[in-house]
Image (spheres, grey):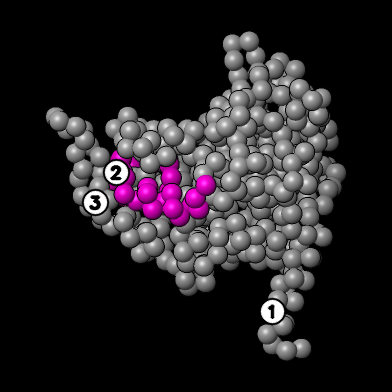
Amino acid sequence: MPRLLALPLLLSLQAIAAGAQALPAAPPATLGFAAGRLERITPVVQAAIDSGRMQGAVVLVARRGRVAYHQAFGWADRESNRRMTPDALFRIASQTKAVTSVAVMTLIEDGRLRLGDPVSKFLPDFAGAGVAQPGDTGILLKPLKRAITIRDLLTHTAGLSYGTDSLVRRQYEAQGLGPAAGWGWYFADKSEPICGSMERLSRLPLVAQPGERYVYGYSTDVLGCVVERVSGQSLAEYLETRIFRPLGMRNTWFFPPAAAAARLATVYSATDSGLVRATEGARGQGDYLDGPRVSYSGGAGLVSTARDYALFLQMLAGGGSLGATRILGPRTVALMTTDHADTLFSRNGMGFGLGFEILEDPGRAGQYGNAGRYGWGGAYATNYWIDPKDELVVVLMTQLLPGRAWETWDQVRAVIYQAITR
């Protein structure tokens, strides 16, 4: 076989194999769950549906690489009597950050990027960024004490907010960012590529010096632009070729194709009289189906299913591989899931790594799970975690904006852990 044809064929065969393997189902008792105890998830989630705390949900629990529980609840769209199904599509917002962080680490493994690289290497205007501080006559800009690095962006210690802070709000809004982008993180309605938005961001003030505070904001969107600049591909193309296709994630996109549109769950909002269908636009349904479809937000832009996201998580739980398909090396996953932020993130038993919140001390945090459990969530009230010690992967999906499902998900977490007996 000619050498130039061998590699594409090998990658194609790997992708087919990964897609075929999926995550097989197995009886919970064979995976170390006590008989019947995992089923306690069902009444907990159903109670949230019945009480009007959420309209619909999908819960997936996998252990040791096999699915022990995968159930759909309630409605995908109440108004049209469309029931929720296990293959429903969800806007996963900040769960996108984990995927973009993995993409960055693949470039580091390739030797094309370094954690210590200054972001100004790829977005030059960041070299002249300043930090906003209040002054007697308005905002003062203080020069950076040091350059923003790729590691700062991965740990959210770059000083980049979502531009909704009162100090910088007007400047961000004038550039179509911050309050002009929903709650700051929304890009699906933008008619310019993400790097265009990030170039404008690079000329706006930070709210903290790099490395001095944990500030949640646009850092991972900047990383998405870095992926584009280093790879020479759009973020959508890079994720598809390097992560989604090899893992068999056939239902994950920034903008779903028309054939999948009917599976997108509806977003609901809480009011004094109960849940109502959210409005159209940035603070509601979004422009994921009919928008410009050109801005690939690495911080909050993906749409996915519980099954697809579980494949991605199982790759991480497997030390960077899913079956025969390897995305990252085990040492890279270990580095990503080690605390890098120390007390900048939390003093209450939680840490933050390269893209993930990490449970450092279950007692101090007051949370179920083992030290080393890691995960995050999304603005539409989606959530996930991986617990390496218990070989556990969990995906929790619903669509609420603002997200108000945390109490239910805390109950589900407790129910999952009480079911593990060996």
Write the residue at 69% across / 79% down. 7
Relative to 296, does residue 116 appear above or below in the rendering? below
Residue linked to disc 2: 205
Q: Per the image, is 400 magenta?
A: no
Q: Quadrant of the C terminus?
A: top right
Instruction: Compute the Cα span from label 3 to label 1.
Output: 45 Å
Residue of label 3: 144
Of tags 2 and 1, which is closer to the observer? 2
Task: Name the residue nearer the viewer: 393 or 183.
Answer: 183
Extreme residue in the left direction: 136
Q: Earlier in the sequence, mark 2 or mark 1?
A: 1
Image x and y of residue 285, in percent: 63, 32
Q: Residues within 10 Å of mark 1 (few under 14, many from 20)?
A: few
Q: Which tag is nearer the camera, tag 2 or tag 3?
A: 2
Which residues are the magenta region? 191-219
Cα separation, mark 2 vs mark 1, equals: 45 Å
Q: Residue at x 75, y 17 (%)?
A: 50
Q: Amino acid at mark 3?
A: Leu
Sequence order check: which comes first, mark 2 or mark 3? 3
Q: Amino acid at mark 2?
A: Pro
In the picture as drawn, the residue positioned furthest to the bottom comes out as 2
* Left or right: 207 as drawn, with respect to 106: left
- Would you identify the image quadrant in which residue 369 lies? top right
Q: Is residue 356 visible?
A: no
